[in-house]
Image (cartoon, rainbow, N blue to C red):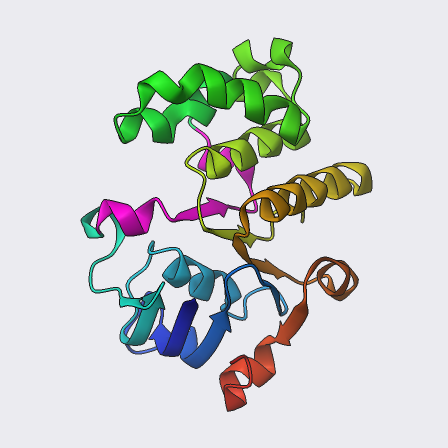
């Protein structure tokens, strides 16, 4: 279970962007978090991904309270979560070839021997042809780069996947392909999903349930 209880978080203690938000995602469940731009949903997603420490509240992952964040969090917790951000060009090192971008988490966790097998599995799964893997971010489209970022998020076989506006900048065909890739992964592994976005039609079709931001923060009905 991924559980956020009474989370208050932000970047200025005097003006937090998230106040007393609670949300749960069960194993194998797909939950959509719907809200307008700037409401704080991405900040909450970063808390759930162990990338931003909240000012108050509790995060439990698989029943274990999270007490450390970012690189200080235990590796077993960090590698249990895969994250895809809205803007691939801000989350990809422009110096890396796509093959190195995807393999980066394996190298960071000492699992280099798995790189050839995982690349062979993931490239077709996300819709990347192998000729693209030798290119750098400036040599591919936004959609192709986002496919690589999704592959990077899946490379460690996470039990939880957080997609923060993953398809907001993409065309309809690429959006459909990426959602299908996520769902194929979830079907194969039973991973839980938190999909953040502002497109209610997409979230309602994609997810088991959709939580509206104003209700989440006002009443805690996200639980």
Is 199 in the magenta? no
Q: Which residue is depicted at the point 50% across and 83% down?
A: 217
Q: Is residue 44 above or below residue 162?
A: below
The residue sitting at 63% across, 20% down in the picture is 140
Based on the picture, tell me whether residue 90 belongs to the magenta stretch.
yes
The region drawn magenta spans: 74-92
* Of the pair 21 and 110, the residue shown nearer to us: 110
On the image, the x and y values in percent for residue 47 come to 37, 62
Compare residues 106 and 72 and report the one nearer the observer. 106
Which residue occupies 63% across, 9% down? 131
Specify the quadrant that holds the N terminus: bottom left
Query: What is the total number of numbered labels drawn onto the structure image?
Result: 0
Residue closer to the observer: 37 or 163: 163
Percent across and percent down for residue 5 are 38, 79
Can I make out residue 145 in this image? yes
In the image, 177: left or right of 163?
right
Residue 185, compared with residue 21, is above or below; it is above
Relative to 201, say whether 168 is above or below: above
In the rendered image, which quarter is residue 109 located in? top left
Query: Farthest residue toward the bottom?
Result: 219
Residue 11 pos. (x, y %)? 33, 65
Image location (x, y in percent) of residue 156 = 41, 36
Q: Nearer the viewer, residue 14 or 196?
A: 196
Residue 16 in view, yes or no: no
């Amino acid at each position: 279970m991924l559980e956020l209880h009474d989370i208050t978080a932000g970047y200025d203690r005097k003006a937090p962007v998230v106040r007393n938000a609670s949300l749960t995602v069960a194993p194998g469940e797909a939950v959509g978090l719907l809200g307008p731009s700037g409401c704080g949903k991405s900040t909450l997603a970063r808390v759930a991904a162990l990338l931003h420490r909240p000012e108050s509240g509790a995060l439990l992952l698989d029943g274990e309270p999270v007490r450390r964040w970012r690189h200080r969090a235990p590796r077993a917790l960090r590698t249990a979560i895969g994250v895809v951000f809205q803007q691939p060009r801000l989350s990809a090192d422009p110096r890396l070839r796509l093959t190195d971008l995807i393999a980066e988490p394996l190298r960071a966790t000492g699992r280099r021997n798995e790189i050839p097998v995982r690349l062979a599995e993931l490239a077709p799964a996300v819709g990347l042809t192998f000729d693209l893997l030798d290119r750098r971010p400036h040599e591919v489209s936004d959609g192709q780069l986002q496919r690589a970022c999704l592959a990077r998020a899946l490379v460690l076989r996470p039990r939880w996947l957080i997609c923060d506006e993953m398809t907001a900048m993409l065309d309809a065909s690429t959006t459909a392909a990426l959602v299908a890739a996520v769902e194929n992964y979830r079907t194969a592994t039973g991973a839980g999903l938190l999909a953040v976005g502002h497109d209610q039609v997409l979230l309602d079709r994609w997810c088991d349930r959709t939580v509206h931001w104003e209700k989440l923060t006002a009443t805690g009905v996200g639980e």
